[in-house]
């Protein structure tokens, strides 16, 4: 069902009867859309958890096009994102789903914010799917901290799903993420976005199935 968080941010919740756990999803740069609503429904049915996804760009009308170099035209909006606001919405979404332990996952940009949520205190287990380990230079803004710092300082257990040819997650950063305490699962030859959206050219069905199995086992504790 559709929700409005106390901040006014839209969210989508799939509830499971008798759920004892919640999973929060932070979408990719394209935001909350049917892909993630269907993911909530599917994961809730599969796990028996309450699963809720949030909109990372509430109240904004952003373009869906890509630039000439293949990057999302809405990338400029990331400089105005606030860690406290977005992670606050993630915490509020967990609370709206129920007073119970919560994990969090995120994809691409949302994976970057998954790492940042490691220091929140609200989430016990976090999985970042090919999240940026350092804030890209063109995305940095005054409201943002570094994902590595949050992973190193946080109490949450963190898993990173990484493709070895993903230019957004260079190996030097991945090694630092491991040193900060994250468990890293590398998929040889996989590029950015290979798990969550079957319509992407980078999608790898075999890797996606394995990554989901590993992620859900990790989130289950």
Image (tube, rainbow, N blue to C red):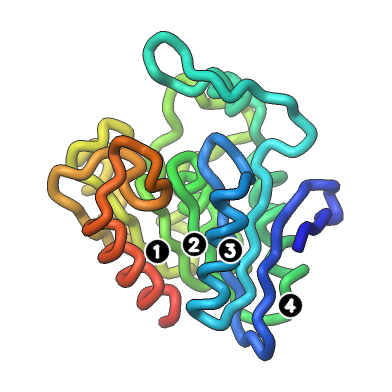
Q: Are marks 2 and 1 in contact (CB under 8 Å)?
A: yes
Give the mark toward the camera: 2 or 4.
4
Q: Nearer the viewer, residue 18 or 75?
A: 18
Q: Tag 2, which secondary structure?
A: loop
- Mark 1 or mark 4, earlier in chain: 4
Q: Gap in Å between the C-alphas at discs 4 and 3?
A: 15 Å
Q: Which residue is under mark 3?
A: 40
Q: Which residue is under mark 4?
A: 98
Q: Gap in Å between the C-alphas at discs 2 and 4?
A: 22 Å
- Mark 1 or mark 3, earlier in chain: 3
Q: Which residue is under mark 2?
A: 154
Give the mark toward the camera: 2 or 1.
1
Estimate the x, y position of residue 151 in percent, counting from the top left: 43, 56
Q: Residue furthest front?
A: 199
Q: Residue furthest top?
A: 68
Q: Which residue is under mark 1?
A: 158
Q: Gap in Å between the C-alphas at discs 1 and 4?
A: 22 Å
Using the image, determine if residue 35 lies above or below residue 170: below
Estimate the x, y position of residue 70 in percent, counting from the top left: 39, 18
Q: Tag 1, which secondary structure?
A: strand
Give the mark toward the camera: 4 or 3.
3
Tell me the residue at 48%/18% (across/down).
66
Tell me the residue at 73%/80% (across/down).
99
- Mark 2 or mark 4, earlier in chain: 4
Using the image, determine if residue 97 lies above or below residue 180: below
């Amino acid at each position: 069902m559709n929700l409005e968080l106390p901040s006014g941010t839209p969210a989508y919740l799939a509830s499971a009867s008798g759920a004892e756990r919640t999973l929060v999803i932070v979408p990719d740069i394209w935001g909350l859309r049917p892909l993630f609503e269907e993911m909530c429904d599917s994961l809730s049915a599969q796990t028996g958890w309450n699963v809720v996804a949030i909109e990372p760009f509430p109240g904004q009308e952003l373009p869906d096009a890509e630039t000439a170099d293949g990057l999302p035209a809405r990338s400029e909006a990331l400089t105005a994102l606030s860690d406290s606001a977005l992670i606050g919405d993630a915490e509020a979404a967990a609370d709206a789903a129920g007073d119970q332990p919560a994990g969090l996952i995120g994809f691409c940009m949302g994976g970057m914010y998954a790492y940042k949520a490691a220091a929140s205190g609200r989430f016990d287990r976090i999985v970042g799917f090919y999240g940026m380990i350092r804030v890209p230079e063109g995305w940095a803004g005054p409201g943002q901290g570094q994902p590595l710092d949050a992973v190193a300082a946080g109490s949450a257990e963190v898993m990173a799903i990484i493709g070895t040819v993903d230019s957004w997650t260079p190996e030097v950063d991945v090694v630092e993420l491991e040193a900060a305490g994250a468990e890293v699962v590398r998929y040889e030859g996989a590029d950015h976005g290979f798990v969550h959206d079957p319509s992407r050219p980078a999608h790898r069905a075999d890797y996606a199935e394995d990554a989901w199995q590993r992620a859900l086992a990790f989130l289950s504790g």
